[in-house]
Image (cartoon, rainbow, N blue to C red):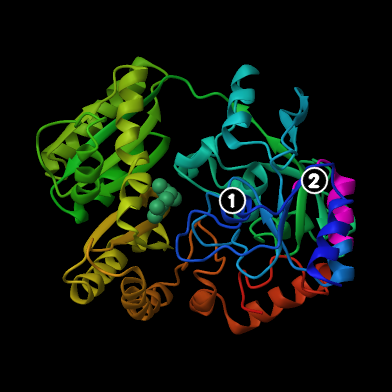
Amino acid sequence: MTHQALIEELKTLVDSGKLLTDTDSLASHGIDWTKHFTPAPMAIAFPRSVEQVQAIVRWANECNVALVPSGGRTGLSAAAVAANGEVVVSFDYMNRILEFNEMDRTVVCEPGVVTEQLQQFAQEQGLYYPVDFASAGSSQIGGNIGTNAGGIKVIRYGMTRDWVAGLKVVTGKGELLELNKDLIKNATGYDLRQLFIGAEGTLGFVVEATMRLTRAPKNLTAMVLGAPDFDSIMPVLHAFQKELDLTAFEFFSDKAMAKVLARGDVPAPFDTECPFYALLEFEAASEEVMDQALAVFERCMEEGWVLDGVMSQSEQQLENLWKLREYISETIAHWTPYKNDVSVTVGKVPAFLRDIDEIVTKNYPDFEVVWFGHIGDGNLHLNILKPETMDKDEFFAKCATVNQWVFETVQKYNGSISAEHGVGMTKRDYLYYSRSAEEIAVMKAVKAVFDPNGIMNPGKIFAV
Ligand SMILES: O=C(O)CC[C@@H](O)C(=O)O
Ligand SMILES: [Zn+2]
């Protein structure tokens, strides 16, 4: 079938005007936030119903056309990039909240519901959807499920996986499966819902998700603390966790802070300059909790783990302190960073970070290295900034040579080469550092069951 004939047939499967092939749409919907792939999709389809998604999948099987799922396109591993003539299936028009079950505290969402839309809906019901990150204003629930998105509240609330009560999926064969039926208890064999979470659209499309909500936190209060060295950060975490249930524990280096402050729209937390900063958050539900937090803070100062600190006294101050952390990724995007998103168990973080820092300092003497991340979960974001004058391809090639040592260290510590950004195309060649050959073989076999013709997001997680 000719290219034009394929497009004409596909057009009949979606509502009128909901198949786009103009250059701008192909460029914008064929890519995510990774900047090193050239988008080249065949078309962008915008289904409005489960039936339309099924029709697209059946058509793709018949015509042997690959499909790429597309949500808010805020991914950082190129899992939603269409660079090989695929049809992008965008969920922008399947974005309704369908149902709220008060007794179950669940919300039934179409996959295109934006994370912030769900957070706001929860708030209107006096409840809370706790998975949160800087891109919550654009990312969609379907994409969050596809990548098992984490973010800034994982230390207390876990990952997206922990909030999915049930899923409806269209497999790579076009079948509609209803997974777990929103039950809390269900001991009836394999939990297929979990397979689709973090599958990056390689098994099928999520077409409906029931998400759990929880009690809204009371009087969230943040502290930003300046530390004299990295080794002081983990004792601070330990000291606070002994007394309080933290809702966040993040860290960032002086370089990260300097870039954010240079924007001019975020106030400095205090004057003392420190090499590292921790941002922690807790529910100051009573005077007693507040006193406990202040007592721990004083102890950290006495021990020399903290040089200076500030605590939010209002919503506005809470927001401003969070901006210091949440603006980092967007701010450093200007330097086309080479990204790593690695994790180890929390107890191994100090030794692991020291080893990795040694590797990057030795190998990137001329590059700026920016450390930040969700250190309370053992998740570190290592960003290497491109010098302004260096060519992009040369820079990425240079960074890729150092990967081997970084990932060997990850493997040595039994860590993960992708903590929360997924594998996509950017990390697929390194998957074996985190998953055994047997595991990868099982994953491929699972894919073949749900997607025998290999039309679902090929080339993501593993090469085709
Ligand atoms: O840009 C990054 O490396 C991390 C992005 C995001 O996961 C964050 O924690 O801000
Ligand atoms: Zn992150």
Q: Which residue corresponds to the image point at 22% horizontal and 65% vertical from the top-left?
A: 389
- Asked if residue 24 lies left or right of residue 113, the reply is left
Q: Nearer the viewer, residue 37 or 2?
A: 2
* Picture disc at residue 24: 1
* Picture disc at residue 290: none
Please, is residue 49 above or below residue 339 in the view?
above
Taking the view exactly as shown, the residue that stands out farthest to the left is 272
Please, is residue 59 above or below residue 210 in the view?
below
Mark 2 and mark 1: Cα distance apart in space:
19 Å
Amino acid beneath label 1: Asp
Q: Is residue 55 magenta?
A: yes
Residue 99 placed where, x, y %? 79, 27
Q: Nearer the viewer, residue 69 or 152?
A: 69
Of label 2 and label 1, which has the lower sequence position? 1
Q: Secondary structure at mark 2?
A: loop
Q: Which residue corresponds to the image point at 45% horizontal and 60% vertical from the top-left?
A: 35
- Asked if residue 28 lies left or right of residue 286, the reply is right
Q: Secondary structure at mark 1?
A: helix
Looking at the image, do the residues carrying marks 2 and 1 touch, with CB atoms under 8 Å apart? no
User: Badge 2 local density, few (<14 within 10 Å), some, or many (20+)?
Assistant: many
Q: Nearer the viewer, residue 11 or 242?
A: 11
- Residue 130 found in image quarter: top right
Q: Which residue is mark 2?
A: 47
**Rendered-image quadrant of the N terminus:** bottom right
- The prevailing secondary structure element of the residues shown in magenta is helix
Amino acid beneath label 2: Pro
Query: Mark 2 against mark 1, which lies toward the viewer?
Result: 1
Is residue 246 among what the camera can see? Answer: yes
Q: Which residues are magenta?
A: 46-58
**Rendered-image quadrant of the C terminus:** bottom right
